[in-house]
Amino acid sequence: MEILFWKVIVEIIQIPNDLNEIFNNGTSWLSNPFGDHRVYGTKFSIGADGFSWKFYMNINTEEGARRMGYGLLSYLKELYSGLDGTVKVKQIGSIHLKKEKPYLSELILPSPPYINNQIPLIQKIMNLAESNNSHEIRVYIFWQFKDHEATSVLRDNTKSIFRYDFYYKIRIFIEVRPLFRQDIKRDEQVAELLGYLDYLITDIKNMKGNCAVLKKADVSAKHLLTMENLFNKSISIDTSIYDSDTKSFSKKIKAIDFSIPPNMPLDKAYTVHNENLGVPVTPPKILLGNAYRQGVLTKTKMYLHLHDLIHHVFISGLSGVGKSRFIASLANQIKNQGAHVGILVINLVKKGEEGLYNPDIILRKRDLEFRVPYFIPDKDIEVICKQVAAYLVSSLGLKNVVLSITKNVLYDDCIKIGFPKQHPEEVFMGVIEWLKMNPYHPKFNTNITRAIENRVISLLSSPFIKNILKLGPVPNWFIEWKKGKNVYIDLSNFTEDGKRIITHAIFQMVRTLLPELRTNELKYVIILDEAHEILEKTKHQSIDDDETVTRHYLEIVFEKVLRAFRSRGVCLVLADHLPNNLFEGVYKLPSIKVIFRSDKDFLQYISNFPEEQDDLANQKNRRALILDGVNARKFAIHTIDYSYQEQINESGSSGEMYCSNCKELLEMSTKFCHKCGTII
Ligand SMILES: Nc1ncnc2c1ncn2[C@@H]1O[C@H](COP(=O)(O)OP(=O)(O)OP(=O)(O)O)[C@@H](O)[C@H]1O
Ligand SMILES: [Mg+2]
């Protein structure tokens, strides 16, 4: 195909959020950024497929077209902080010029001056975009800078403000593509369409009383494409302006309101209040995503300093916003940046998330290797007895009085025989014994004994829990994790109590076995997605209720753990969808917060401004506000792409499963055999 010329298309994909303010400044996109006599075109398309807004210019080379496109887009971005768009170039050949536009009319404006202050033509097009969703309507506006008489009139002797009078030649065309539906009479649909066109030209009247009219266009589709010969007998509009700043001469225009109406159906830019991108982060650093600046997604990459992670990370976001992928990408980069950093993922809810982390070791309910000794001795045995008693009692939902008894039972054994009982189950039997020997009020005694017998013993006597928590040497996985391996612990098919006690036993082990450091260096990461499973505060506030009591002490235990982690170089990454149900410490103590689209109730803790809360509640998927308390930075990002790893290093498993009944090959992650119905 012979190339006749190149067309650049600048499509606007995002507009500012605070358009009312911009409107009051009189900012208009009808301008002549290149300062010459070239022809500019823009097209608004409305119809069943939605709305689009594109600017066009023509030139004879591809590079020239691209250059003009970026020039124009940058200029529009300068006019409208928060505006964003894309630039595309297209080659135009003779074949394109043959296309016809059967229903093309021209909006002929009466000659100025006009009665109305400003003709709200663009506003009307937007209103139509809201009501018309049946037919295709396209409004083309072409303009060219007309020779001007640069009559610089000194308006004010003292301030030396010039007055510039400029004029644009303008033509406006309307193309309709009727899309008739079968279920409604054609006449009715034609009348509807014509009514819409009539609406577009309402309110346009000049001083002599002449109105705007729609006439069949005397140019063809070819002219709209080439943008040539449009202004031989053009209408010029008095777009006179005056402004103190010569550069923005085209921003204030009188006759037609060529601004951006707030109801334009495009994405709105959400700017971060008090945005602060800070100074560039020094290596080792981990990539968070691409920065939004003034609400516009840019190619600027934003990082966190690796060692700042010891101040812990909290991530909030409703379901599906991209939390898990984000955490996994963090884990992946931490691995790439600091090979010595061990990552431990405690998976609480979703099955199959191991695919996100590429772990070296996976531990599941039935694995014999899955051990977390509930008690790890240390020099100060009394302190350890206290800590173990605190996490056992609080994660099992027992009242505080049991705490000192449990501690005494543990401590007694340690003193007498050198180590506590083999299983926590036996510790609580000891607590019941102790209660028998040293009774409290009978009712109280009965209640506690019953709680221990019914809930605690039954949970702790489960063979899985027993095997996991029993005393023993430091498990192999822990040793490997400490050396820098990735460990994935799947707790998804344990009960809530089970998840809680195992997680706290892990925390206790970490606290006891890792030495305190003086370096503020990141050594280990523990990831806890869906944190509500173990860190949710209770909804009922009754002081006598076991749950209330549990959560209260659990909260204290957790806060102590979090503080102890930092001094050991352990970063805790916590994520949840409804953080206001969690202990406050979960989102208050971590210094690095990542706020995806979240629940309004929670956002009150993040911002005092209703507008900012609104913006955060409206973020698109994968956009997040980063509050980096360590460096006082505040900015928004779009997360980097991250996918599931293809292969999972799970030794001993080929990945294929067969039905135990009919031996049929089972589909991946199915719950039942599709051939014989056996439940897997
Ligand atoms: N960084 C990313 N790269 C590629 N796709 C992504 C990314 N983040 C999110 N997605 C897409 O969005 C979906 C939801 O993401 P993800 O599972 O991370 O959300 P979530 O916030 O953890 O949701 P839930 O609360 O339900 O667990 C993914 O399945 C994926 O299709
Ligand atoms: Mg998730």
Image (cartoon, helix red, strand yellow):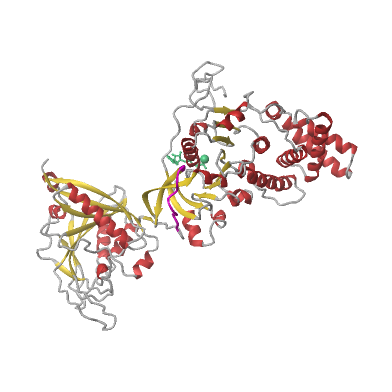
From the viewer's perspective, is 308 left or right of 500? left
Which residue is at 55% across, 34% downward? 342
Is the residue 238 above or below the residue 427 in the image? Answer: below
Image coordinates for residue 646, horizontal then vertical, percent:
44, 28
The reply, left or right, for residue 565 in relation to residue 268 is right
Instruction: Identify which residue is drawn at 30% across, 51% down.
Output: 184
Report the predominant secondary structure element of the magenta stretch. Answer: loop
Identify the image quadrant of residue 152: bottom left
Residue 30 lies within the magenta run: no
Closest to the observer, 453 or 409:
409
Q: In which quarter of the image is the C terminus?
A: top right
Chain part drawn in magenta: 275-285
Is 47 or 617 nearer to us in this picture?
A: 617
Q: Is residue 618 left or right of residue 21?
A: right
Q: In which quarter of the image is the N terminus?
A: top left
Residue 188 in the image: state x and y as whole percent.
28, 56
Q: From this viewpoint, is residue 177 visible?
A: no
Q: Percent from the top left, x then y, of residue 232?
A: 9, 63
Q: Residue at the far front: name it.
A: 518
- Where's residue 51, x and y in %? 31, 53
Q: Which is nearer the eye, 281 or 159? A: 281
Q: Would you say residue 280 sits in the magenta stretch?
A: yes
Q: Can residue 479 be seen in this view?
A: yes
Indicate left or right for 69 with 606 as reference.
left
Vertical placement of residue 21 versus 136, above or below:
below
Front position in the image: 454 or 333: 333
Q: Tally the marks.
A: 0
